[in-house]
């Protein structure tokens, strides 16, 4: 991985003008078959030309599992890596076939059935005899038959080695303590079983008012997924899946191949007919688990299992939290810890991401709502990140979401900063998620990238660039690469504009790099509450409300762990943790703490003048101490935090650094951070459809610089008392400020060149159009897209021409109100400029009266072409080309 060093050896201005690979977009390169050397050279050269800095080769479902890691595959992999290195690209090892790290395309468990996933199921009834039956993986099945076939041999979910791990007699009503639970494991056994079910029997009988709860483990006989509790499974995965790649690469490791990336290691999220209680999916099981749980909880394993399902008395939440802490630590160490040690031995960096239940949401569990994340590597984000060298997270679709903010938080907690954000698109107009979004525009993806940078991203990871665009006449998801979580952005008609996106967004990331974000507020990540209460508890939604509400008010924040709080320093009423300074701490419906030391730290912060607020449920349990009776927060709100609550909290906090006030109903995205030498950096971005105006002030006056992400140039803007910044739709500004010692009375404005709208000339008639360079021109309207004018399934570059008649000599600008989606403007056959997003405004220069030849080359998306004759098109065609009349506007004189 391209390591980050922005100290004395790298000039921040040079880094901004010429961003390195660490800041440039990276991408999965989907291999649907083994590529030839010519394909590798052609595509990698294209990726480099379009501004991508890092490539991760990923074998996808369309490639035969027999080809994956074959001698031919390994040879092609080395050839591709060698070409990438010569081109100046960085390469990372995506560590598996398709996704779900650990299975090595099925090779990990081949000949090692003992490494296949083993799960714990349970059943409760008033009878001494019962069944475990109907086990199924709904999370997998929703993605279709090809995914089921990939994960399960023969597409069949079968089980074996059924074993009673715990059996307990208990009251069917309330339980007041573990002493009221009778362990009858030794008297319960499996009496019948097959590949899909088992029957167990207790040699006694449940009395009146009693229930029997039985926990049975079974190993999958057909799953290619591994048991993540077993370090030997990770070791086998390395031996058959990673070592062959590294050995084939030889001296190309560690440069250009500098890191390995794991992706969503998670066993199946199973449900079954008898599932009940407070745990939503089956648990992984390994022989090491019972002793580890007994040591970690101080209680018997069997009775602790019952606490996962129901209330067993006053110690229930404590038992649950401790159980999942042990379970998660065992899994994290067995898999991620083993990978880290291997990576360090190979001299490369470990990164990647676990499954994120909050994906595409601000709510902690608002994404994958069908799973209980406690059964996977999906709750202890701070602990998992401690086992990585670089932080990576997953994001879905093109909305602001929790992932980058939580990623930046765990990175800072572990001594790093910011994160890689993998971004994939799932279909929104069809239930077949893998159909993706071929309707994606460059403007949409650019806006998302900038939002992600404002939320803590360093590098944008694309999912992905494709080896092939698949084939017509087959809407099958995954197997037809066209619908393998499209779009393959290099097959979009707007792909040739990607370098504009890559260069600008890389500069924004490089601009942010030298500064520390201003985050006056810390949100406690309530790990032990999540363990004890589960994903349906309102801590998840309270986190979402705090995040969304704070950002809406222009206040940045960071998550902290209990360990961060317990080890924090307090200085002048501020909490110093994770390399940041906080004026306030928020507890989002926290009911369980791990440590009494955390409480003492919060008490000390509050006593020093710090602000501590809480919302929702109150703290009730401390795992290593007694129950907390006295209030922990200076202010508590019982309800979901609302705008009035958030503004009240923010009114209590001092302002450090420049003030940014928005004078528009909507607020631009912003990032504010300080450098060690007293300079501050500000990013402002308008992702809306109307102009926004913000006002910046800083003490009695400040010096300012404008850093242009478009050109890479830095200009001194002057010294001001106030600076008004107008942002057109989709406009971004990067500013650097430093408070001055003297009072300054001058006010400044940052606006675009003034245009004389009163003399605007609409260009409505006289246009002709050709659907491609070799097609004939026909008359066309520019007030509706070409998809409505006889070119319904044309995806590509359409050419508009107009004999432009100029009446007055002036400096003329061409304004295109609506473009779907990108455009090049040419005058007299000479390219003026190209635009990938709003504002679509071109400076035509000084034009004399007469007729001028104007040509606009507009590229749309691939949606109308690739969704044609499939179930994925939706109700309407996607807009294509010009959909509103262009306007000619002179510069004011």
Image (cartoon, helix red, strand yellow):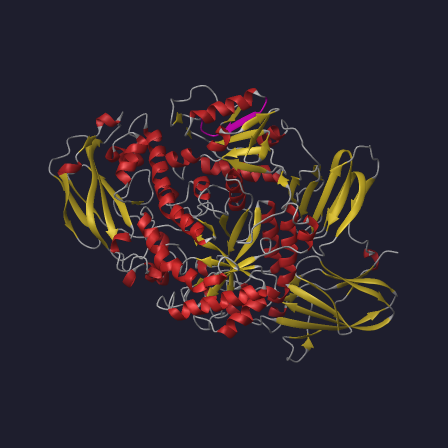
Q: Is residue 697 left or right of residue 392?
A: right
The structure residue drawn at horizontal position 48% and vertical position 62%, both measured from the top left corner, is 251
Question: In x, y percent, where is residue 385?
Answer: 46, 43
- Above-or-below relation of 224 to 87: above
Magenta-span inclusion, residue 616? yes
- Above-or-below relation of 346 to 703: below
Specify the segment rendered in magenta. 609-618
Question: In x, y percent, where is residue 608?
Answer: 58, 21
The structure residue drawn at horizontal position 31% and vertical position 36%, both measured from the top left corner, is 308
Q: Quadrant of residue 628?
A: top left
Question: In x, y percent, where is residue 841?
Answer: 74, 60
Q: Quadrant of residue 216?
A: top left
Q: Quadrant of residue 737?
A: top right
**Quadrant location, the C terminus:** bottom right
Magenta-span inclusion, residue 781? no
Q: Residue 292 or 81: which is nearer the viewer?
A: 81
Q: Residue 151 or 312: which is nearer the viewer?
A: 151
């Amino acid at each position: 991985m391209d390591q980050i060093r922005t100290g004395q050896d790298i000039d921040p201005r040079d880094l901004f003008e010429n961003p390195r690979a660490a800041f440039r977009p990276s991408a999965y390169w989907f291999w649907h078959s083994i590529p030839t050397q010519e394909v590798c050279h052609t595509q990698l050269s294209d990726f480099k030309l379009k501004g991508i800095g890092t490539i991760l080769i990923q074998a996808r479902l369309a490639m035969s599992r027999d080809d994956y890691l074959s001698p031919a595959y390994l040879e092609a992999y080395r050839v591709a890596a060698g070409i990438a290195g010569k081109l100046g690209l960085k390469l990372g090892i995506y560590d598996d076939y398709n996704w779900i790290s650990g299975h090595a395309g099925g090779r990990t468990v081949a000949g090692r059935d003992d490494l296949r996933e083993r799960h714990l199921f349970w059943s409760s009834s008033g009878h001494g005899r019962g069944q475990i039956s109907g086990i199924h993986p709904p999370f997998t099945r929703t993605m279709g038959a090809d995914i089921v076939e990939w994960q399960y041999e023969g597409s069949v979910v079968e089980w074996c080695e059924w074993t009673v791990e715990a059996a307990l007699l208990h009251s069917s009503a309330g339980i007041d303590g573990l002493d009221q639970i009778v362990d009858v494991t030794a008297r319960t056994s499996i009496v019948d079983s097959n590949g899909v079910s088992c029957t167990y029997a207790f040699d006694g009988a449940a009395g009146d008012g009693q229930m029997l709860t039985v926990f049975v483990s079974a190993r999958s006989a057909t799953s290619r997924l591994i048991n993540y509790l077993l370090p030997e499974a990770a070791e086998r995965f390395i031996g058959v899946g990673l070592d062959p790649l590294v050995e084939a690469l030889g001296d190309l490791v560690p440069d250009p191949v500098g890191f390995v990336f794991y992706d969503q290691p998670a066993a199946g999220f199973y449900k079954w007919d008898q599932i009940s209680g407070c745990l939503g999916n089956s648990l992984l099981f390994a022989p090491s688990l019972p002793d580890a749980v007994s040591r970690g909880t101080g209680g018997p394993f069997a009775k602790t299992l019952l606490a996962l399902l129901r209330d067993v008395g006053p110690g229930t939440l404590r038992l649950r939290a401790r159980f999942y802490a042990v379970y998660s630590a065992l899994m994290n160490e067995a898999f991620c810890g083993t990978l880290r040690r291997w990576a360090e031995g190979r001299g490369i960096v470990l990164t990647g991401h676990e499954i994120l239940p909050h994906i595409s949401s601000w709510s902690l569990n608002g994404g994958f709502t069908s799973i209980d994340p406690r059964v996977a590597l999906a709750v202890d984000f701070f602990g998992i990140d401690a086992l990585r060298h670089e932080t990576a997270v997953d994001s879905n679709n093109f909305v602001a979401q929790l992932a980058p903010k939580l990623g930046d938080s765990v990175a800072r907690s572990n001594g790093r900063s910011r994160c890689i954000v993998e971004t994939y698109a799932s279909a929104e107009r069809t239930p077949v998620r893998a159909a993706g979004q071929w309707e994606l525009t460059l403007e949409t993806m650019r806006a998302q990238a900038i939002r992600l940078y404002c939320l803590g991203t360093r590098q944008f990871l694309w999912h992905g660039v494709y080896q092939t665009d698949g084939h017509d006449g087959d809407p099958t998801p995954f197997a037809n690469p066209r619908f393998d979580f499209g779009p393959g952005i290099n097959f979009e008609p707007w792909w040739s504009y990607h370098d504009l996106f890559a260069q600008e967004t890389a500069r924004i990331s490089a601009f942010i790099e030298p500064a520390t974000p201003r985050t006056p507020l810390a949100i406690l990540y309530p790990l032990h509450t999540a363990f004890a209460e589960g994903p349906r508890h309102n801590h998840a939604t309270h986190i979402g409300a705090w995040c969304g509400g704070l950002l809406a008010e222009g206040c940045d924040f960071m998550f902290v762990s209990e360990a961060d709080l317990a080890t924090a320093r307090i200085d002048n009423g501020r909490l110093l943790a994770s390399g940041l300074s906080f004026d306030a701490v928020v507890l989002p419906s926290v009911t369980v703490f791990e440590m009494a030391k955390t409480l003492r730290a919060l008490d000390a912060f509050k006593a020093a003048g710090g602000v501590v607020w809480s919302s929702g449920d109150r703290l009730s349990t401390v795992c290593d101490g007694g129950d907390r009776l006295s209030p922990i927060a200076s202010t508590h709100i019982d309800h979901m935090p609302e705008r009035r609550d958030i503004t009240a909290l923010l009114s209590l906090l001092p302002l450090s650094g420049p003030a940014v006030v928005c004078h528009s109903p909507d607020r631009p995205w912003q990032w504010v951070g300080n450098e060690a030498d007293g300079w501050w950096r500000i990013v402002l971005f308008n992702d809306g459809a109307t102009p926004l105006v913000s006002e910046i002030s800083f003490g009695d006056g400040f010096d300012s610089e404008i850093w242009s992400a478009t050109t890479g140039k830095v200009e001194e803007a002057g010294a001001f008392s106030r600076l008004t910044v107008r942002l057109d739709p989709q406009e971004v500004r990067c500013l650097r400020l430093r408070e001055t010692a003297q009072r300054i009375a001058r006010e400044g404005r940052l606006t675009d060149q003034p245009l004389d709208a009163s003399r605007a000339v609409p260009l409505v008639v006289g246009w002709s159009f050709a659907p491609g360079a070799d097609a004939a021109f026909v008359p066309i309207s520019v007030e509706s897209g070409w998809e409505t004018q006889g070119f319904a399934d044309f995806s590509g570059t359409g050419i508009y021409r107009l004999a432009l008649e100029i009446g007055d000599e002036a400096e003329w600008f061409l304004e295109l109100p609506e473009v779907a989606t990108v455009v090049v403007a040419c005058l007299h056959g000479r390219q003026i400029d190209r635009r990938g997003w709003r504002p679509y405004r071109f400076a035509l220069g000084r034009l004399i009266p007469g007729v001028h030849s104007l040509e606009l080359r507009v590229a749309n998306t691939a949606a109308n072409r690739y969704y044609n004759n499939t179930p994925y098109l939706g109700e309407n065609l996607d807009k294509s080309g010009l959909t509103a009349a262009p306007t000619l506007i002179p510069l004011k004189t």
